[in-house]
Image (cartoon, rainbow, N blue to C red):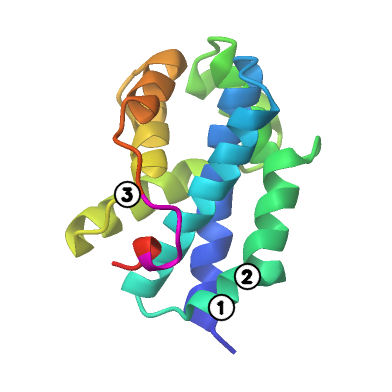
Amino acid sequence: DDVVGVEAAGALKNIMAIATGISDGLGLGMNARAALLTRGMAEMVRYGVAIGARPETFMGLAGVGDLVLTCTGDLSRNRAVGLRLARGEPLDVILAGLGHVAEGVACCRAVRDSARRAGVELPITEAVSAVLFDGNAPRDAVAALLAREPRVETFRAAQP
């Protein structure tokens, strides 16, 4: 019954899948994937709460369940976009040859802009946006994320 939370989770998990595809495509390993899923979930909750979602929605199938599947599944279109970006393929070529819609591409711009207006920090979304729309190299986006100061890993830290 949390429509805002389900919609936010559905949009952001696709962005996180692109990020995970980039990480996997760069060969960064399972620890990097785990970090992306963990920090991605924090981003999802932080954004969701800021737009009126209930945080517990993100702990169910619409949140963590769909996040894990979309970020790790071999059939994930959004993860496939990230894998191909990591190989250096241009976004327009990827999208033209995909044969399906990769919702995370359009969602990334919309969520990024919405979060900026709301004053919500979404570093993974910003990094994916920089790769998709600003021509940043995937390795540079990863380096920018890794250069961030460590933060407390609690739910409270995920609040706006």
Q: Label 2: which residue? A: 59
The quadrant of the picture occupied by the N terminus is bottom right
Q: Label 3: which residue? A: 112
CB atoms of marks 2 and 1 within 8 Å: yes
Instruction: Count residues near mark 2 (Cα–Cα under 10 Å), then give few for <14, some for 14-19, many for 20+.
Output: some
Is the residue 43 above or below the residue 80 in the image?
below
Q: Label 1: which residue? A: 56
Disc 3 versus disc 2: nearer the observer = 2
Mark carried by residue 104: none
- Is residue 154 on the magenta stretch? yes
Specify which label sits upstream in the sequence, 3 or 1. Answer: 1
User: To which quarter of the image does residue 155 belong?
Assistant: bottom left
Pick whichever, 132 or 101, lies toward us.
Answer: 132
Is the residue 49 above or below the residue 140 in the image?
below
* Chain part drawn in magenta: 152-156
Q: Secondary structure at mark 2?
A: helix
Q: Residue furthest bottom?
A: 1
Q: Amino acid at mark 2?
A: Met
**Cα distance between the residues tagged 2 and 1:** 5 Å
Q: Is residue 42 shown left or right of residue 89?
A: left
Residue 130's x, y, as percent?
A: 33, 29
Q: Is residue 102 shown left or right of residue 123?
A: right
Instruction: Count residues near mark 1 (Cα–Cα under 10 Å), then give few for <14, some for 14-19, many for 20+.
Output: few
Residue at x 67% of width, y 22% of height: 29
Q: Residue furthest right?
A: 74
